[in-house]
Image (cartoon, helix red, strand yellow):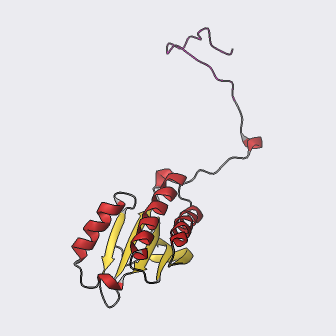
Amino acid sequence: MDHPDFSIVPPILSVKVEDNIDVVIVRDTARRAASLLGFMPALQAQLAGAAAVLAELVLHTKTLHEINFNGIQVGERVGVRVSCDVPWLANVSAEKVKLALRFKIGDLVDEIHFEQGELPSIVLLTWQKVSQKSPVVPNPDDVQNPEPQVTDGNNHHDQFSTS
């Protein structure tokens, strides 16, 4: 993986996948993990879609799999890591697995890794975009509402001015 120095941060969640309903649970769990880390709803939905695709893929093997979700941090970057052990892919090249996953998942996640070894695993990473962090909702009592003014660009008030 490109980030060997990452730290695992909460949440740490997992879902066992053995039935079609588990795909829905995986989708909801991905959204929840991303939400807990402050991801915007659009990124939550993208991660949920990618995790659901992974769940559907492992479901086709007709064996029990576990999909794990956890927060990760590298310096100031925060992300969600979705992983699943895939022993049935032990004899497939990493490039073929990554190509197939990129075809199925597209750009729903930032990174796709296939970690080979004694127990191969698929890892999906999505990083929080600094400009897309969930905004803090201000207290309505703290917000001042100045009267809007419409101008014509020449610093003259036109007929729609409120003053």
Q: How many marks?
A: 0
Given residues 82 and 28, the one toward you in this image is 28
The residue drawn where x is 46% and y is 57% is 46
The residue drawn where x is 33% and y is 73% is 113
Observer able to see residue 5: yes
Residue 55 location in percent, x, y?
A: 45, 71
The residue drawn where x is 38% and y is 79% is 61
The outermost residue toward the right is: 141
> Is 24 included in the stretch rendered in magenta?
no
The residue drawn where x is 35% and y is 66% is 111
Range drawn in magenta: 146-163
Which quarter of the figure has residue 105?
bottom left
Residue 49 location in percent, x, y?
A: 46, 60
Residue 87 location in percent, x, y?
A: 34, 86
> Is 157 included in the stretch rendered in magenta?
yes
Observer able to see residue 76: no
